[in-house]
Image (cartoon, coloured by chain):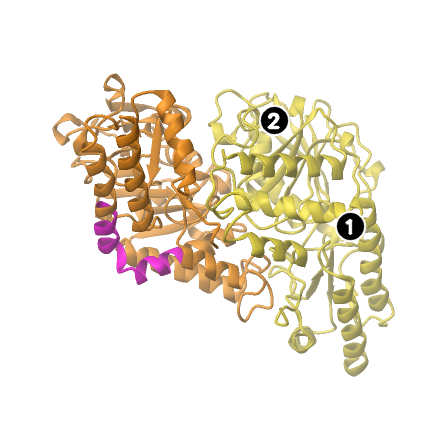
Chain colours: A orange, B yellow
Amino acid sequence: MSERKYNFSAGPAVLPLPVLKKAQEELLCLPGCGASILEISHRSKQFGEILAQTKANVRELLNVPENYKIMFLQGGALTQFAMIPMNIIRNREVSADYVVTGNWSKKAASEAKTQGKINVIFDDKEEGYVRKPKDEELRTTPGAAYCYICANETIEGVQFQKEPNVDLPLVCDASSEIFSRPVNMEKYGILYACAQKNAGPAGVTLVIMRDDFVEMSGDDLPSMFSYKKLAEKDSMLNTPPTFGIYIMKLVTDWLKEQGGLQAMYEKNLEKAKLLYDAIDASNGFYRVHANKEYRSFMNVSFRLPSEELDKKFQEEAKAYDLVSLNGHRSVGGERASIYNAMPREGVVALRDFMVEFAKKNA
Amino acid sequence: MSERKYNFSAGPAVLPLPVLKKAQEELLCLPGCGASILEISHRSKQFGEILAQTKANVRELLNVPENYKIMFLQGGALTQFAMIPMNIIRNREVSADYVVTGNWSKKAASEAKTQGKINVIFDDKEEGYVRKPKDEELRTTPGAAYCYICANETIEGVQFQKEPNVDLPLVCDASSEIFSRPVNMEKYGILYACAQKNAGPAGVTLVIMRDDFVEMSGDDLPSMFSYKKLAEKDSMLNTPPTFGIYIMKLVTDWLKEQGGLQAMYEKNLEKAKLLYDAIDASNGFYRVHANKEYRSFMNVSFRLPSEELDKKFQEEAKAYDLVSLNGHRSVGGERASIYNAMPREGVVALRDFMVEFAKKNA
């Protein structure tokens, strides 16, 4: 235990310690099962209860209305990038609007093009992906099926501070901010998130989908690519990623114990403020990538005056047990991912180190 | 620990106890990482080593030639049922031959039909899926790209005892027998297996593919459905199921310690013989589904003289810590899955119970 460090990895990322302890305790034998969670049938009574409780937790935490299905799929966000247009626009010969605000929404738009007509209605490429659009910049396309957004661009650290106000149902990749704040589900046709940032381990993707979207799947699709077939079988069309769902149950149990998403939101804002205040007080030694009003409270992306200092910063941080602070390989610099499970103490330790490092190296 | 029972589940299924113990020991903190395997980046040095070692173990155990790629994908066998024809026959306007010997090959053929022309060259439906074809029954189709087989039909307990001799590369679902015996890889274009029966937990699928098959993917496919793109990025096109791969590393480490696949094969044959001998000596009290020469040494599917006795058998077995003996919901009866990780003691305990139960109830 004393070996554990403050882990700022963007994903797979830190999990709540009580979740890991519980999983460890039960790993040889899930109570009442005679076997590990890794070894029991997905059709067993015990796994059925885990699946049902995970769904109930998600429904409660995100306040998901009854006309939305909750599914646990595989393949990460990159699979959803393709499955969404494959199910929603391909067969119905409609188009879809995409809002491009960074690496992940750009990739989603690119994958969607393999399945049908998409309209990029905003692209912040020229500014270098530093902000989200204002509502008045978004003109949706007549007849489009949905408006696609990435709630939080993990690489650039750029986040929608609230849902954009458009006249289409939103389809949203919330991978790096799911469960970090309350959301207004009624604005969404689809809200999805791979688990490995804020909800569990790699290998399970939470997909929440309004019933009319579920029904759009073409009948010619292979079973595993059809939301309709997946939803009909309640994520059990084949063996689901049972361990990932079990960990998501433990994470959502923990979130409820923490007071739910409003409480998490307040904690997250306060943690982010600790870092951004230190950055803003550094006289430009630390520079944030995102424009001020769009700064992410999940991924604090910043850089130092030189690549040499970036390197030195990350190296010296390790001596303080602050690890995985490197920026994404596509942009470099630093990134501190401070998801729900990152304790305030970890953020304070990083802040203190940053203040000290700036003093010595400015 | 004393709570653990002999678990005959068909999948997810029993794992080697040393694997579970190692995973438990490391679950809070992977040595040298400062974090759990669940929490570290897939691009970290540590995970890179795990991935490389798992691949090396698979290559060594199955004696995989250098002109085959080894990939760790998501979505289970049902996803492969669609991806294989999507990559291999759809764009190239060729057909494929399917050998239908039970539930899983039947489903594979059905999913393949969504992608192109398939030829069912053998179907044992009329006999009730009790056997595999003899070589002389298999006439392949001129121009077909591959011949698809399911090595072991988990539900019916029917197994190829060796690779069929056909003039096409085999594409094989080995989900419920991977690592149970040596294979002649050169007969295969694709050999794949979901992990949750004999190789690890649910959520990771091992796919071994000859280079010329990898190259067949159409360029119009979404990235996650293209073997070519997945292989190019060495299973890291996006975040792979890191924990599942880690467990597969531990399982394959354990297999090597056990003496490799020839040693496992001998143990497996001996375990299966214990049960089949007891069945054959029961004067018809226990009846095996499969024809004698095609009996699976992984899944022993049998039934008792009545459904009442089936129920009584399963109920009383629990008192002896013998669990998950129910047959698949589509066929009923009993099924004892005796994968690599089922210890001989468990099989002996089941055999002894079966002998005793037959004596009392015949």
Tally of marks: 2
Residue located 69% across and 62% down the image: B335
Residue A12 placement (x, y as % from top left):
44, 42
Residue located 23% across and 55% down the image: A263
Residue A81 placement (x, y as % from top left):
39, 33
Q: Amino acid at mark 2?
A: Ile
Residue located 69% across and 38% down the image: B58
Q: Amino acid at mark 1?
A: Gln
Quadrant showing the N terminus of chain B:
bottom right
- The magenta region covers A250-269
Q: Nearer the viewer, mark 2 or mark 1?
A: 1
Local crowd size for mark 2, using a 10 Å CA cut-off: few (<14), some (14–19), many (≥20):
many
Is residue B333 highlighted in magenta?
no
Left of B1 or right of it: where is B275? right
Is residue A257 highlighted in magenta?
yes
Residue B115 placement (x, y as % from top left):
55, 31
What label does residue B88 carry, if any?
2
- Residue identified by numbered label 1: B258
Residue A341 placement (x, y as % from top left):
35, 50
* Residue at the far front in the pictured view: A360
The residue nearer to you, when weighing B37 against A169, is: B37
State whether the magenta stretch is mostly helix, strand or loop: helix
| Above or below, B281 relative to A93 | below
